[in-house]
Amino acid sequence: MITTDFTSSLDDFLNTPLGTLTHVVVIIGVAIGVAWLLHIVIRRSVVSIVSGVKRGRGVDDTQALAVSPLAAVRVVQRTRTLGTVLSNIVNVVIVVIAVLLIVHVVSPGILSSFALLSAAVGAGLGFGAQNIVKDVLNGIFMVIEDQLGVGDVVDVGFATGVVEKVGIRVTQVRDVNGVLWFVRNGEVLRVGNMSQGWSRLIIDLAIPLDADFDAVKQQLLDAARALADEPKWRPHFLDAPEVWGMESVSDEAIVLRLVSKTRTSSKDDVGRELRSRFKVVLDGLGIVPLSLETVILAGWEGAGSVGGARPPRTKPVIVDPSKLGKKKRVPKGER
């Protein structure tokens, strides 16, 4: 009896303007509380994963992971990116649900009475909002497929720079000049990620024709490998420096190409240090270089020089040496 009276009194109170306002405030408060709790769960999950990777690699700073195995860096970047995207999704879903509940409380029959109108408006908005749906879906797939992550250096066509934030509709990229670009995910047709895997540093050195080419080549290679063996620089190299040889010859100089496979975050630093070391070597030999520049291969030339990538694995074919060189006899009737 007491419960029935309480329920009846509560219904009467909720039907008053003050009761409606109270109901709306409760919905907003619950929505804020749920969003706060979900954000705490996401944040703690991200921090837990990142801290676990740091402890596993014995580092305190995320930047120090650059000298750790590449998989550890990708785990941290992808975890933070997923955390950002999940937070955005939580905000959108909770706001939409809260708005629908508030509309239902203020006017219970408004949703049903405007059903036909909302269907017509929805059809019109559906055609106009297809770009928004495209942005959201493309953004979700970019994160799931690990095309980019927070902290990656990417080229998305519209802008090239560091990814600062990945939203469900827009990705923020800051270029080298400090300009923050807001790139719609649906407009990204291709992503060039310069932070995944490895990078190749290519330096072309033009030396005079009268110089001893073999001696210069050997001393430059020795200087590059000596840099790769130093404790300070060893973590930045993924392979020993190489000399690809004579790239071109003109009536003034011979172009010598030296390459090195480095970590993505260390390519520029290694390039600057190598050029300074090469300058010291050339000064010691009394040679004035005509040019000393970094080269970025493109097109078929770049595709043909991608050694060290992950080629497709195939099963080995076992060949019997005794059968090599022997032709298979074909019966006369099958000739």
Image (cartoon, grey):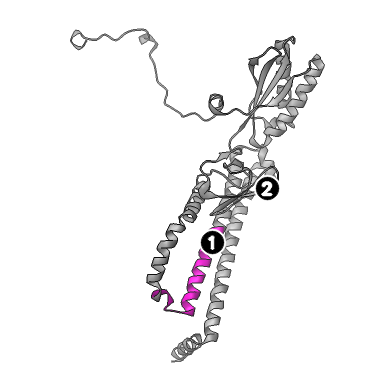
- Residue shown at the point (39%, 76%) measured from the top left: 113
Task: Choose between 70 and 166: the one closer to the eye.
Answer: 166
Label pair 1/2, CB-CB below 8 angstroms? no
- Residue shown at the point (66%, 39%) measured from the top left: 66
Taking the image as shown, residue 258 lies to the left or right of residue 1, namely: right
Queried whether the magenta region covers residue 90, the answer comes back as yes
Queried whether the magenta region covers residue 130, the answer comes back as no
Quadrant housing the N terminus: bottom left
Q: Which sits earlier in the primary sequence, circle 1 or circle 2?
A: 1
Give the image location of residue 249, x and y in percent: 65, 13
Look at label 2 and name its amino acid. Answer: Val
The numbered mark at residue 90 is 1
The numbered mark at residue 179 is 2
Q: Callout 2 environment at 10 Å: few (<14), some (14 to 19), or many (20+)?
A: few
In the rendered view, tell whether residue 79 sits above or below residue 220.
below
The numbered mark at residue 3 is none
- Residue shown at the point (50%, 52%) measured from the top left: 135
Q: Majority secondary structure of the magenta segment?
A: helix
Q: What stretch is highlighted in magenta?
A: 88-112
Look at label 1 and name its amino acid. Answer: Val
Task: Choose between 67 and 265: the one closer to the eye.
Answer: 265
Q: Is residue 230 visible?
A: no
Q: Nearer the viewer, mark 1 or mark 2?
A: 2
